[in-house]
Amino acid sequence: MANETEQFNDRLNRIENVRRRNRGGMGFVVHPDGVVTSIGKPSSRLRFGFPLKGLILGFIVAVAVKSYLMWAVGSEVYSLQVESMLTGQAFEQLAAMVLMPDAISLWMVDRYDAIYAFVQAGLAAGEPA
């Protein structure tokens, strides 16, 4: 019976250690007088309530898509379409402000040109003469 109790307590200790590790080392103790005190040190990792990674990923995808559109239809046509959206409804004006060409998008358009030239050179080199 004592052996089973020791095994049970060992198992409880292992579970508590795993839970403590998952909490970043934080745990708590409730004293007989009802006072709760923390044990361990808090995790040094910052935790945000807002999904910052998702926001950054969404920004990167939006810039990549906007740059591809600028590259595919041409900068002049794209700029004319954005300017025509500026005279539309409130939602179109908001979309036009987001879709306006900026420095990052123009830089990405140049990268798309370089990638396209590289792919075309590779395809030309692979064709039989």
Image: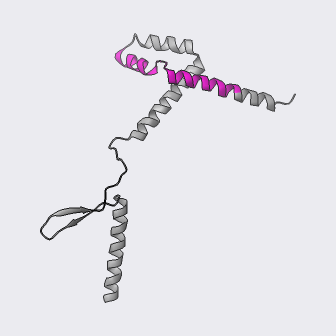
Q: Position of residue 56 (x, y in %)?
A: 44, 36
Residue at the spot x=49%, y=13% of the render?
81
Residue at the spot x=34%, y=44% of the render?
48
Which residue is the extreme one toward the left? 33
Q: Quadrant of the N terminus?
A: bottom left
Which quadrant would residue 50 be assigned to in this image? top left
With 67 as the anchor, is 97 left or right in this view? left
Residue 116 shown in magenta: yes
Q: Give 79 or 12, whichever is nearer the viewer.
A: 12
Q: Main secondary structure of the magenta part?
A: helix
With 80 as the anchor, is 48 left or right in this view? left
Q: Position of residue 18 (x, y in %)?
A: 37, 66
Please tell me how many numbered marks the rendered image carries: 0
Q: Give 108 or 58, whichever is nearer the viewer.
A: 108
Which residue is the extreme one toward the bottom? 1
Which quadrant would residue 3 be assigned to in this image? bottom left
Q: Position of residue 26 (x, y in %)?
A: 30, 60
Query: What's the magenta region?
Result: 89-117
Q: Position of residue 66 (x, y in %)?
A: 51, 24
Q: Quadrant of the C terminus?
A: top right
Q: Give 16 or 97, whichever is nearer the viewer.
A: 16
Residue at the spot x=75%, y=31% of the render?
122
With 124 as the anchor, is 49 left or right in this view? left
Residue at the spot x=39%, y=39% of the render?
52
Above or below residue 119? Residue 80 is above
Residue 26 shown in magenta: no
